[in-house]
Image (cartoon, rainbow, N blue to C red):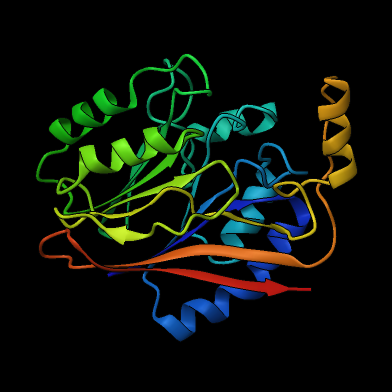
Amino acid sequence: MRILAIGDIIGRPGRAAVREILPGLCRENDINLVIGNGENAAGGLGLTLSTAREIFDAGVDVITSGNHIWTHKEIVPYLDSELALLRPLNYPPNPGRGYLFCKNALIVNLIGRVFMGHFDCPFRAMDELLSQLQGKATTIIVDFHAEATSEKVAMGRYLDGRVSAVLGTHTHVGTIDSHILPGGTAYVSDIGMVGPVESVIGVEPDSAINNFLTQIWRRLPAAKGKVSFDAIMVDIDEKTGRATDIRRVRSTVD
């Protein structure tokens, strides 16, 4: 089984790049399942029903998210709908779900706690889920939406041999540490983003700089120009659930 996991999709430029690049990428590489993080897909922050449908129509099978999933209230009722849309599993009781089954795989969305917020423990939440669903899935993919690299690496090591892949999102900066852990779990600290290259993690540079200079937070618009498409491709042995290969996919579109 070949999985493609797409980094945080940033606003209209990110959605356009997914539409342009994803269909051909799937055809050329025989992709079986596509996961995309959509929590920044609507104007660079949050997700709406129309932007979610646009991402699904482009070929994404499952949309994961993170701390910005609640930004646009209109999406909240759809977190419990038939849409393949996840919010982090270890949030306190809220609408939505943190995992789902798709194409013979279990996809799980977790959120970190370091520099992120007061959430339930993602390690214990994952233990509980794996115990609850024991034997129901061999291929298990985890989107760990977290800030601290140490927390992400720790999660990868903690779940090594118990899941097929732990793939980090949230920082929008792709890391060079994609590898297979000793127990057969594919790991990367951060996939990266689908967003403008000339930006500050996807948003307009001058606006981001001004926020740092003034310490007054203002909504930041998505930047423009050439867009990078960051993703991770993972090959998984469906009999064992172990990853056999992990590699970074990166391209740009004007």
The residue at the point 74 percent across, 60 percent down is: 197
In front here: 67 or 205? 205
Relative to 3, residue 135 above or below: above
- Position of 55 with respect to 119 (left or right) is right
- Position of 92 with respect to 162 (left or right) is right
Residue 118 image position (x, y, % from top left): 47, 14
Residue 66 image position (x, y, % from top left): 53, 34
Residue 218: quadrant of the picture: top right
Residue 235: quadrant of the picture: bottom left
Relative to 5, residue 115 above or below: above
Task: Quadrant for the C terminus, please.
Answer: bottom right
Residue 172 image position (x, y, % from top left): 60, 48
In front here: 84 or 131? 131
In front here: 242 or 18? 242
- Position of 175 with respect to 253 (left or right) is left
The residue at the point 80 percent across, 58 percent down is: 198
The residue at the point 72 percent across, 74 percent down is: 253
Residue 103 image position (x, y, % from top left): 31, 60
Residue 93: quadrant of the picture: top left
Count of numbered marks: 0
- Position of 121 with respect to 254 (left or right) is left
The residue at the point 52 percent across, 18 percent down is: 117
Task: Quadrant for the N terminus, please.
Answer: bottom left
